[in-house]
Amino acid sequence: MNIQFLGANRQVTGSRYLIEGGGLRLLVDCGMFQERAFTKRNWESSPVPPDTIDYLLLTHAHLDHSGLIPKLVAEGFDKPILTTAPSVELAEIILSDAAHIQEEDAKYKIKRHKREGRKPAHPVVPLFTAEDVDRALHLFRATEYSKPVQLNENVSVTFHDAGHILGSAMLELKIKENGLSRTVIFSGDIGQCDKPIIRDPTMLDHADYIVMESTYGDRDHGKTEAVEDQLCDVVNNAVAAGGNIIIPTFAVERAQELMYHLGRLMSEKRIPHLMAFLDSPMAVNVTDVFRRHRYCMDEEAHAILDAGEELLRFPGLNLVRSTAESKAINRIKGSCIIMAGSGMCTAGRVKHHLVNNVSSPECTVVIVGYQANGTLGRRLVQGDSPVRIHGREHEVNATIEQIHGFSAHADRAALLKWLGNFGTAPKRIFLSHGEESGAEKLASEIRAKWGWTVDVPEYQDRHELT
């Protein structure tokens, strides 16, 4: 039995792992690389021959975990893709949107090259198309939380709620080989406890091997109850300055959480009733998925809904789908809140809103999620100016604010708490999905605290699980 690490190693995107055992080859996640230094890997052929993979197990629908599935299918993969029911719906939305962006970006580059008189060495083509997505979606199979799925006579998988986004899961693999049974846990992305709307992450207590994320392995978020206070201050300061509030927004979870908090602040009259725009067709569609999967929500959300109140709507909120509606936002006078994708400013409508606002001293850009190395969002947080957007340089005169408590990832303390629930020492822990410094620091803490064996694998490392 062995595992190979094919993404999210010493960085936070491109999650992909191959585990072989019990007569099967299983691919866990198949994510897109989004950090600029690694995006060329997206264009490389699959490091695992697609026709040799028996199942693809998807922890959740975020693009850095699912984004290369259509390309894998285009290369020949045609076996079942197992994930939770909400993730099936979210993957359809996210992957379809990604295909649209890929196709539009290819058209835009061709047009720009023609305008600039450039002749690229290779044809400009999308990474994958809408047709590739359609073929992939036919392979998805919905599973239930906490119900083992038998993959063959030697291997089963159970999906547990990870509390990261709607439908997110930890995977518990039980593999029999050579007369022995081993349990391998893939944490997926572990969420924070006591977050609004969705349930807390599952606490597991036994594993022989653990593959765990380490996104915030070297830092803590601080008091999450202060999130609304921070958001309140940012909005009020931006209104006083007279500019727009641009919030690069992840379509899944972050958009819904923002709507929840903004609605509460307005109803409590802590911020003025502003026009607000969720300028993301994908986020609008995702919000509909939330409403269809109420069983995945926590007790607080149930109480709000049972009282007949709106959970994800408030007066003045406009759900924007069309391009014409998006462009019309720029004609509005006075301050408004614009939530638009993508969350790391790597693509989507937020880039157009940044072009129109980032050079304005009155504008405020609010960063509410993790920003990977090399992304436009990270450059804004770092204070870089100018920044390149759509092929042109733009001076950053806007105020850049960052609120950490919105993160959908567990922090250092929560990761250690999750690990501490395991009753016996795992044989080995592998830390992935974290920048090198954060993963190494968390590994040192685990060794010091429990004396457990911890590895921080390199890209394409293979390890025997003996």
Image: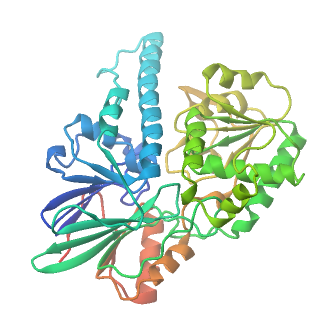
Residue at image coords 48%, 64%: 162
Residue at image coords 82%, 53%: 265
Q: Please say whether residue 401 is visible from this viewpoint.
A: no
Q: In x, y percent, where is residue 325?
A: 68, 23
Q: Please say whether residue 2 is visible from this viewpoint.
A: yes
Query: Is residue 325 placed above or below 148 in the rendered structure?
Result: above
Q: Give the quadrant of residue 337.
A: top right
Q: How is the image coloured?
A: rainbow
On the rendered structure, is 346 left or right of 106?
Answer: right
Of residues 247 and 139, the one drawn nearer to the viewer in this rendering: 139
Q: In x, y percent, where is residue 58?
A: 36, 54
| Image quadrant containing the C terminus | bottom left
| Image quadrant containing the N terminus | bottom left
Residue at image coords 36%, 59%: 9
Q: In x, y percent, where is residue 430?
A: 34, 71
Tally of marks: 0
Q: Residue furthest left?
A: 178
Of residues 157 and 60, the one drawn nearer to the viewer in this rendering: 157
Residue at image coords 74%, 53%: 261
Of residues 146 and 23, the one drawn nearer to the viewer in this rendering: 146
On the rendered structure, is 163 left or right of 320?
Answer: left
On the rendered structure, is 299 left or right of 216?
Answer: right
Q: In x, y percent, where is residue 26?
A: 23, 57
Query: Is residue 212 placed above or below 128 in the rendered structure?
Result: below
